Image (cartoon, coloured by chain):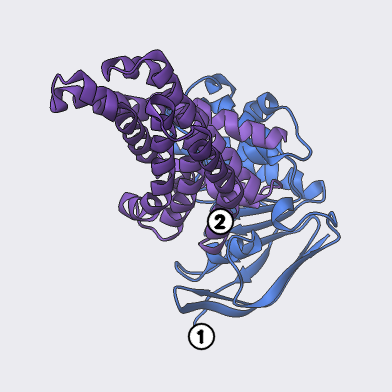
Chain colours: A purple, B blue
Amino acid sequence: MSALGALIRRDIRIAFRVGGGALIGVMFFLTVVVLMPFAIGPDLALLARLGPAILWLGALLASLLTLDRLFLADHDDGSLDLITMSRSPLELSCAAKALAHWLAAGLPLIIATPVLGLLLNLDVSATAAVALTLLAGTPALTFTGMIGAALAVTLHRGGLLLAVLVLPLSIPVLIFGVAASEAAITGPLSFGGPFSILCALSLFGLVIGPFAAAASLRHGLD
Amino acid sequence: MRLSGREVGCVRGGREVFSGLNFDATSGEALAVVGPNGSGKTSLLRLIAGLLMPSRGSIVLEGGEAELTLAEQSHYLGHRDALKPALSVSENLNFWRDFLGGEKSDPAESLAIVELDHAAHLPAAFLSAGQRRRLSIARLLTVRRPVWLLDEPTNALDTSGQKLFATLMGDHLARGGLIIAATHMPLGVTAHTLRVGDVS
């Protein structure tokens, strides 16, 4: 376990150093959400209605933005060779890397959500609902996106392939994330239904992602 | 401990790199893999490290720790240094010590041996090619592995660095270690020679 802890600590540390990816996602999220009210215009009711969808879309794109670097950097500098050869199973190492990516790039998005909710005329309970659905849903984005990141490394194709592979997998997360947020704000559906599915998607990704990514990395060794 | 390959063949990108390769190395022995560029020296090391699959034949380690695979008992020192430029020298080394596991020694001591102790707090981005190589060598010293797979290990090292590394390889062999090195230069330790890709 100490090996995986070391991997998580290292990735988080790199993400927050100069040139790391942690703040790029938050800045992107900030930009999208700050610009949106200017584009839509000063219609407060409309903003409040679109708010959850805008926050979710911003968070989804922001978390995909840095995902292609998940394995690429380690592949390019040879670390991935040593990680593959090490005594920790590759599946667990992949899971540790995804967890570190989520902590460094996903969690800051959720922390930024309350501030951005103000810009979209969302009240406290609505913002809390969106933040909660993001907390439940973004792990699914990271862990399914990891499969695309691993394939991008092994197929030697960069960002475009990742987007094509990962976007279909992230659509259900987006649908149920926004549905759960809107159910909490306006009803009439119950919050529990879509939120449970969102949690299920995350758990599904948590189980499938590491195995698929490790299989892809093993298969594509060169 | 004995590492042996029988009738090993390797195919990369649909092209046969080599085939029918036989080799043996026992504890305390070094094997120098020589051959022209593109003859498959690196491929052979990556086969042994488990990073490539042989197209034919087998590579086995006898007398090692039974519960560990060959890759898990090996150090691989490749062309790429596996260093993160954003992390400091000691952070890089401490990470590999914690992650690779097994029998460890003090990273500070290894840094002193490779003469990098003065740069321990410097980000790895500022190291020269030779210093990066020395830091990679410090990884071999910090975590104990019986099998060293070295790909052009003395690349970028200065004369004193090459002498130092020869001494370190000698120590490793004396402790019962085993070295397979792809090289164009004399290794500096007594070694058997394995020729790959000789087109006759």
> In the displayed image of the protein, which residue is found farthest to the front?
A188
Q: Residues within 10 Å of mark 1 (few under 14, many from 20)?
A: few
The location of residue A143, given as percent across then percent down, is: 52, 44
Instruction: Quickly name the residue at label 2.
Output: A212
Q: Along the horizontal axis of the image, is A30 left or right of A170?
A: left
| In front of the other: A197 or B72 | A197
Q: Is residue B107 above or below residue A198?
A: above
Number of marks in picture: 2
Q: Along the horizontal axis of the image, is A174 left or right of B32?
A: left
The location of residue A97, given as percent across then percent down, is: 55, 39
**Residue A88 in view in this figure:** yes
- Chain of the residue that carries numbered disc 1 in the rendered image: B
Q: Residues within 10 Å of mark 2 (few under 14, many from 20)?
A: many
- Chain of the residue that carries numbered disc 2 in the rendered image: A
**Residue B69: quadrant of the picture:** bottom right
| In front of the other: A145 or B183 | A145
Instruction: Quickly name the residue at label 1.
Output: B200
Mark 2 on the same chain as mark 1: no
Q: Quadrant of the N terminus of chain A?
A: top right
**Residue B185 in view in this figure:** no
Q: Secondary structure at mark 2?
A: helix
What's under tag 2, amino acid-wise? Ala
Instruction: Identify the residue shown where x is 32% and y is 33%.
Output: A53
Q: Is residue A112 above or below residue B41?
A: above
Tag nearer the camera, 2 or 1:
2
